Amino acid sequence: MSEASQAPSGRASLPTLPDLRQEQFFLSTVRQYIDVEDTEEKGELVPITERTTPWHHTKNIRWGAFLYSLFMEQFVSPLWQGMLWGLGGVALAHARQAMAIARAHRMRSPTAQAKTLAKEAEKTAPTRQLFSSWIARLGLSRLFL
């Protein structure tokens, strides 16, 4: 291999993103209720026939706290979230309906409607005058005005 292929590329490596999945969060929450034996392996080789898992070193599991955490994380928290989203949706629907009713009530009287149209015309008058003058300068007034 050449030296060029072994040289690091000019790109800076990006930092790894943390695992933000719900399962990893739950496991990190539950891990505090599991006591693990402190076994220090000082370079000892484990025979291939012997299998070790993290559960072999488990000393004690506090089941009450574990089940409470499980119940809160998996049942109560999603229930509260769903209720809040549902209530928020209902509140927004009612607010939207109330605004539509108020707008319709304001527009019922002809004087209110005429005032609203006059205000909108006043807002657009300067822009309309500007575009009219540009069209006249370009000699396109016969086409647009």
Image (cartoon, grey):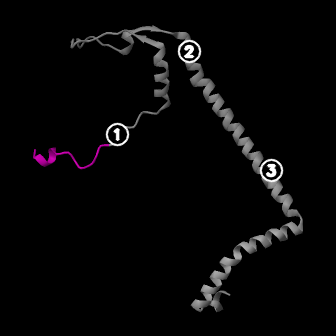
Disc on res. 15: 1
Which is nearer the eye, 76 or 9? Answer: 9
* Left-right relation of 107 to 122: right
Q: Secondary structure at mark 2?
A: helix
Q: Are marks 1 and 3 in contact (CB under 8 Å)?
A: no
Which residues fall within the magenta stretch?
1-13
Q: Foreground: 129 or 102?
A: 129
Of discs 3 and 2, which sits in the foreground? Answer: 3
Toward the top, the furthest residue is 59
Q: Position of residue 7 (x, y in %)?
A: 16, 45
**Residue at position x 74%, y 41% from top?**
90
**Magenta span dominant secondary structure:** loop
Tell me if mark 2 has few (under 14), some (14-19) or many (20+) residues whose alpha carbon lies within 10 angstroms of its own: few
Local packing at callout 3 (Cα closer than 10 Å; few below 14, some 14-19, many 20+) is few
- Residue beneath label 2, please? 67
Judge from the rendering whether residue 51 lies leftward or rightward of residue 22; answer left or right: left
Mark in front: 1 vs 2:
1
SS under mark 3:
helix
Q: Secondary structure at mark 1?
A: loop
Mark 3 vs 2, N-terminal side: 2
Disc number at residue 59? none
Q: Which residue is mark 3?
A: 98
User: Which quadrant holds the C terminus?
Assistant: bottom right
